[in-house]
C-alpha cells in the first residue's frame, strides 16, 4: 500500500519564502516611472533603497535574486539612517522673516498682496530678542563645535536692513548667517557689510535676459528688476557664499540651458 506524503506542518514557511521581492515576507520594492525612455526606478519605501534598471529588464531584475541580495546588504544601515532622519534630528537652522513687506510683486508669490504692501515689520529689539531665544534653544540641540544657521528671508528682508544688520553684528559668533534677497536693495555698502562678515547671499533671478526674467519679477509699478539684479550679481561674482535661486515656470523653461550658462559665466 502506497504511503501518503507527509503533510507540511502548520506555520512552516515555503522554501521560496523570503527569496523573492514582493512576496509578503521581505522587502516590497516598487517600480517608479521617472519619465525616462530607457530606465525605471525601483524603490523600497521603508529604507529608501533604490536602483535604476532598464525597462526591458525589469521583470528579470525583480526575480533573479541579485537585487534582493544588494538590498539585504544595506537594509539595516539604511533603516537606521532613515530612523535617525525621522526621529533623531533636531533643528539646526531657521528661516527668519523680519518683515512681511516686499518691494516687488512677483507673479508667482504665495504671500498675500496685502501683507507684501503693508504687512508687519519687526523692530530691531524684537529681532534681537528672538535671536537671543534661538541662541538659548540651539545650545541644547546643536552639537558642540557647530554653529546653527539663521537665514533672513521674506518677503524682502533688506526692507528691514537696520534690524538685520544689527542682528548680524550682535550674534556674529553665535550663528552662521545668510540673506535671501531679490537683490534690488543690494548696494555697495550692503554688499561690503555682508561679504566682510562671511554672510551667505542668495539672490533670485529667473532669466538670462530682461525679456524673460522680467515676465515674472516686477515691482509694484510693473517695472522689471533684471538690470538691478544683474548689477548686484556682477559685484558678487566669485564670492564663496553667493548663490542664485531660479524659479522655473512656463515663462522660462525653454531657456534653462542658456540661463545655466549665464550663471556659470557670472561665476555663480
Image (cartoon, rainbow, N blue to C red):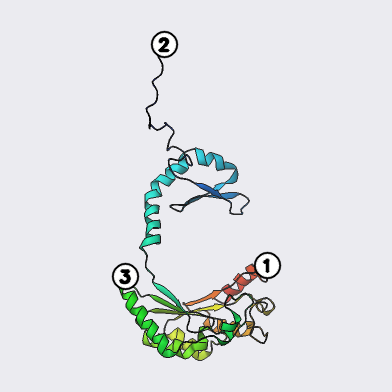
How would you rate the neighbour count of disc 1 (Cα within 10 Å): few for under 14, some for 14-19, many for 20 or more?
Answer: few
Residue 155 in percent (x, y) is at: 54, 81
Q: Depth check: 57 or 2 in front?
A: 2
**Residue 134 placement: quadrant:** bottom left
Q: Depth check: 230 or 150 in front?
A: 150
Rounded to the nearest whole Å, what is the CA distance between mark 2 and mark 3? 74 Å
The residue that appears at 65% across and 68% down in the rendered structure is: 253
Rounded to the nearest whole Å, what is the CA distance between mark 1 and mark 3? 44 Å
The residue indicated by pointer 1 is 254
Rounded to the nearest whole Å, what is the CA distance between mark 2 and mark 1? 77 Å
The residue indicated by pointer 3 is 143
In terms of secondary structure, where does tag 3 sit?
loop
In terms of secondary structure, where does tag 1 sit?
helix
Q: Depth check: 267 or 140 in front?
A: 140
Quick check: can you spot residue 3? yes
**Residue 177 placement: quadrant:** bottom left
The residue that appears at 37% across and 68% down in the rendered structure is: 90
The residue that appears at 70% across and 78% down in the rendered structure is: 211
**Residue 198 placement: quadrant:** bottom left
Q: Is residue 218 left or right of residue 79?
A: right
| Residue at the limit of the structure toward the top, as seen here | 1
The residue indicated by pointer 2 is 2
Q: Earlier in the sequence, mark 1 or mark 3?
A: 3
How would you rate the neighbour count of disc 3 (Cα within 10 Å): few for under 14, some for 14-19, many for 20 or more?
Answer: few
Residue 184 in percent (x, y) is at: 57, 86
Quarter of the rendering occupied by the C terminus: bottom right
Total labels drawn: 3
Judged by depth in the image, the label closer to the viewer, 2 or 3, is 2
Amino acid at each position: 500500500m502506497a504511503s501518503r506524503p507527509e503533510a507540511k506542518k502548520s506555520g512552516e514557511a515555503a522554501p521560496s519564502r523570503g527569496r523573492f521581492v514582493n512576496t509578503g515576507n521581505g522587502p516590497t520594492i516598487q517600480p517608479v516611472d521617472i519619465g525616462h525612455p530607457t530606465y525605471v526606478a525601483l524603490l523600497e519605501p521603508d529604507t529608501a533603497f533604490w536602483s535604476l534598471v532598464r525597462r526591458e529588464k525589469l521583470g528579470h531584475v525583480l526575480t533573479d535574486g541579485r537585487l534582493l541580495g544588494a538590498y539585504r546588504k544595506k537594509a539595516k544601515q539604511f533603516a537606521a539612517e532613515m530612523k535617525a532622519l525621522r526621529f533623531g534630528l533636531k533643528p539646526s537652522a531657521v528661516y527668519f522673516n523680519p518683515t512681511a513687506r516686499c518691494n516687488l510683486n512677483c507673479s508667482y508669490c504665495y504671500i498675500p498682496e496685502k501683507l507684501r504692501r503693508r504687512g508687519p515689520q519687526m523692530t530691531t529689539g524684537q529681532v534681537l530678542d528672538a535671536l537671543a531665544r534661538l541662541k538659548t534653544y540651539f545650545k541644547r540641540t546643536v552639537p558642540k563645535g557647530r554653529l546653527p544657521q539663521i537665514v533672513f528671508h521674506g518677503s524682502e528682508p533688506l526692507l528691514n536692513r537696520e534690524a538685520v544688520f544689527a542682528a548680524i553684528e550682535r550674534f556674529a559668533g553665535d550663528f552662521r548667517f545668510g540673506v535671501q534677497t531679490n537683490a534690488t536693495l543690494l548696494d555697495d555698502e550692503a554688499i561690503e557689510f555682508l561679504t566682510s562678515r562671511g554672510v551667505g547671499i542668495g539672490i533670485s533671478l529667473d532669466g538670462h535676459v530682461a525679456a524673460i526674467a522680467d515676465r515674472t519679477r516686477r515691482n509694484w509699478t510693473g517695472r522689471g528688476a533684471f538690470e538691478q539684479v544683474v548689477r548686484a550679481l556682477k559685484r558678487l561674482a566669485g564670492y564663496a557664499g553667493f548663490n542664485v535661486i531660479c524659479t522655473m515656470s512656463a515663462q522660462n523653461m525653454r531657456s534653462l540651458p542658456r540661463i545655466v550658462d549665464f550663471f556659470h559665466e557670472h561665476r555663480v
